[in-house]
Each structure stands twice: as structure tokens, then as C-alpha cells.
Image (tube, helix red, strand yellow):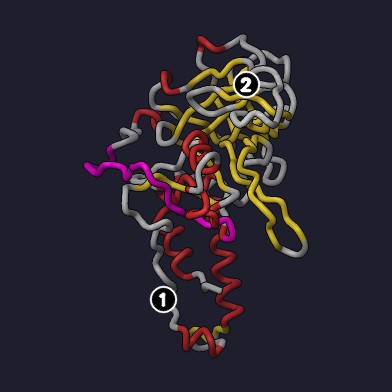
Amino acid sequence: MNSAATTQRKPEDKVKGKERIRGPKLAILVKRAKGVPSVEGLARAGEDRVIASNKRLDKALVGTDEWKSISDVFACWSGTMTGYEKPGKKLGKSVVYTDPETKQRYVFPVPEDYKGTKNAILAVEHPTYILIPDGKDLVVDVKNIENVSLVENFPTSDGWYLTDEKHGIPIGNQVSSSNDDARHLWRIDSRVGPVARGYAYCYGYGYFGYVNRRYVILYDGPSASLGVAVEAPEGSAPEIETVSSPVSSVQAESGVLVKGVTLDEFRALVGDARSNLEELLQTVREEKLEPLLKLVETLKIKE
């Protein structure tokens, strides 16, 4: 692991003399329709936002109507980063997972006291971790090792289960779906990545019937494009304001943005820039690219 990057970490709740924005409410940072990979979600949260945990999202999704106020975020990434091995395989030095889409490797180092445990899952909450490049890998770097939990009795197959109290992760033996406290686990053999919540069934062409509010998703690779929800103070708007495109509506309607550049050509240029930035995020610390990411988002043409 890159020791220099680790020693230069900033305290997770106070950066550059500024407190992170926290609170009892939730707000949309990224809509699902404009979904981003989990790495970019971390970059968007930056140094002042806190990505909502799986437990907090569960509170919004189940038993209340809070989720309706941020329904455009689902399906979304949570701030609960996890790592687990194949059923029956003991935890070793680290859990290593390769995203099937991008071939990017993600590594979750295993705390010494947790090594040798099987059918368990590691969990740590944002903002107590970051992802740092180590060669071609992205490593889950935790400021304080005590922030990493070992959730034991992690189920070896999909199904309905009760959950642990701290992170809301399914544990134990299967139970009936009629139990209001049960959550449906969707997992693969081995994985490193955040928990996702709020997947929807789709009926017809692009029509979403309803949100799977009780599903805990540990299936997709971190490169999947999902929404992002963050903590927010009382009285906050359900969606965080974003900077609108500097291109005037008159220019956009005319199909020409600047001399010699059409609307479609401009969209293509911005799209290429975003793709290249996402590739750079695999090897460069997120905060280094944050100004460029914000610039690209600002230049995007809103449909």
C-alpha cells in the first residue's frame, strides 16, 4: 500500500477547517438517470459530503415514505464499503475483486484480528475510508482500523435474512419474507464494493413499476452507474443544487454552441472528456481530478 498516501490522509469529518455536512435528512447528490460508478460517487461527495450508509437508506426505504422524496436516486450506491470471500473460504491478507466490466482490481485489506474467519463480511462506512491507487489496484484505505467491522454469519446464498444492527447487512439463517424485519440478500461469490439499494422492477419500455425497498444488493461491480444519496441537515432540499450548463437555451435550440461546433459535436466532446476522466480516476486520487469532473458536469447539456 502507498504509505505516503496513507500518512497524508485528512481527518474524515473535518477537512481544511471545514466540517462535513451531516444531518438527519437525505438529499440526492446524483440521480440514477445520470448514474455514476462508485469511485466517481466518492469524488462527487468530495471533502464535505457524507454518502448515506446502507443502514440510513434502509430507514428511508422501509417503514416510512421518506424514500419518495428522493425516489430519483434509486437504485443508488450507499457509503457502506464491503469485502467478502467465496462461501467457506477463510479471510486471508486481503479480499481481491476484479470488476467484470472494467477489469479494475479492488483490494480490501483484512485486519489482523479478522484473518482466518470464514462466511463473514468486512464493512466500513463513508467517510472513514478512501480508495487509493497501488499500482494497478484500488485499495480500500481506512484511517482507523477500528472502523472496520467484521460481520459474521454472512449468508452463503441469496434469500431473506435478518440483519446486523450496525450496518444493516443480512446475517444468519433464512427467514420468511413475511417478516417485516427481513431483507433480501443478492450476492455473488466474492466481491469488494459498496452496498447498493433500491433496485426497481421494470415493466414495458422504461417504465419502473416499483422499487425493491427491502433488497440489499452486493452483486454489481463498482463500475455500475447508479445514483448517490448524501446526508443533509433539516430543512434541506431533496436534491443538491448543481451548476447549470453555461450554454444558453437559445444556443442549444439552434444546434450550434460555438462557431463551427454543433450541439451533437459538443455533446460528443464532453462525453469523451468524461470517459477519459473516469479512466484517470482508476490511477489518480479523486480530489486531484475533482475540479475537472465538476467542469465536465457543468458543460453537460441538460436534456
Residue 105 in the magenta stretch? The answer is no
Question: In this picture, is 124 found above or below 201?
Answer: above
Q: How dense is the environment of label 2, judged by Cα within 10 Å: few (below 14), some, or many (20 and up)? A: many
Q: Residue at x 70, y 31 (%)?
A: 177
Across the whole image, how many numbered discs are drawn on residues? 2
Q: Residue at x 44, y 32 (%)?
A: 129
Q: Amino acid at mark 2?
A: Ile
Task: In the rendered structure, find residue 246 and report the number of the disc placed on it.
Answer: 1
Q: Position of residue 20 (x, y in %)?
A: 31, 42
Q: Write down the quadrant of residue 216 in the picture.
A: top right
Give the extent of the magenta segment: 14-33
Q: Amino acid at mark 1?
A: Pro
Query: Whole-Å distance between the Cαs marked 2 and 1?
Result: 49 Å
Residue tagged 2:
171
Q: Position of residue 136 (x, y in %)?
A: 59, 37
Task: In the rendered structure, find residue 283 and report the number of the disc placed on it.
Answer: none
- Left/right placement of residue 297 relative to residue 216 reads left
The answer to whether residue 131 is visible is: no
Q: Write down the quadrant of residue 236 in the picture.
A: bottom left
The answer to whether residue 58 is visible is: yes
Q: Residue at x 46, y 54 (%)?
A: 28
Hey, which residue is sitting farthest left in the picture? 17
- Left/right placement of residue 188 relative to residue 27 reads right
Picture quarter with the C terminus = bottom right
Question: In this picture, is 114 found above or below 292?
Answer: above
Which is nearer the N-term, disc 2 or disc 1?
A: 2
Question: In this picture, is 249 found above or below 172?
Answer: below
Label 2, secondary structure: give it: strand
